[in-house]
Image (tube, helix red, strand yellow):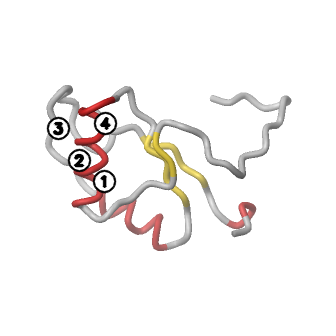
Amino acid sequence: MNLHNTLTIAIDFDGTIVENAYPRIGKTRIFAFETMRKLLQDGHRLILWTYRHGDRLDEAVAFCKENGVEFYAINKSFPEEQFDDTQSRK
């Protein structure tokens, strides 16, 4: 896959995909899953970047999968990433 033609987008869970109700899963935010599915369909890669860990993280990942979104990576960078010391990681 040519990384120059696609975006890699990190997305938070609580407060972005769903309303913030941590540790519970909040109500789905309007257009969140539709937007993520469209991004995936267009060839972009999504990374779930969240404070959640353990069982709470597993619940969030399963919730997203049930709604048609599977992430390229979860709480980590991806293998093909090339670091550029002149650019911030944030």
Which of the 4 image quarters holds residue 14? top left
Label 3 sits on what residue type? Ile
Number of numbered discs: 4
Cα–Cα span, label 4 and label 3: 10 Å
Residue 32: numbered disc: 1
Considering the numbered disc 2 on the image, is that residue within a helix, a strand or a loop? Answer: loop
Label 4 CA crowd tier, 10 Å (few <14, some 14–19, many 20+): some
| Nearer to us: label 3 or label 1 | 3
Label 3 CA crowd tier, 10 Å (few <14, some 14–19, many 20+): some
- Is 48 left or right of 45, judged from the image as shown? left
Which residue is denoted by mark 2 in the rendering?
29
Which of the 4 image quarters holds residue 90? top right
| Nearer to us: label 1 or label 4 | 4
Label 4 sits on what residue type? Leu
Q: Nearer the viewer, residue 90 or 50?
A: 50
N-terminal of the pair, mark 1 or mark 4, is: 1
Cα–Cα span, label 3 and label 2: 11 Å
Q: Residue at x 14, y 32 (%)?
A: 24
Considering the numbered disc 4 on the image, is that residue within a helix, a strand or a loop? Answer: helix
x and y, in percent, of residue 33 in the image: 30, 58
Which residue is denoted by mark 4 in the rendering?
57
Label 1 CA crowd tier, 10 Å (few <14, some 14–19, many 20+): few
N-terminal of the pair, mark 4 or mark 3, is: 3
Label 2 sits on what residue type? Arg
| Nearer to us: label 4 or label 3 | 4
x and y, in percent, of residue 42 in the image: 52, 72
Q: Residue at x 71, y 52 (%)?
A: 80
Which residue is denoted by mark 3 in the rendering?
25
x and y, in percent, of residue 59 in the image: 23, 42
Q: Check the image and report above or below for 80 versus 69.
A: above
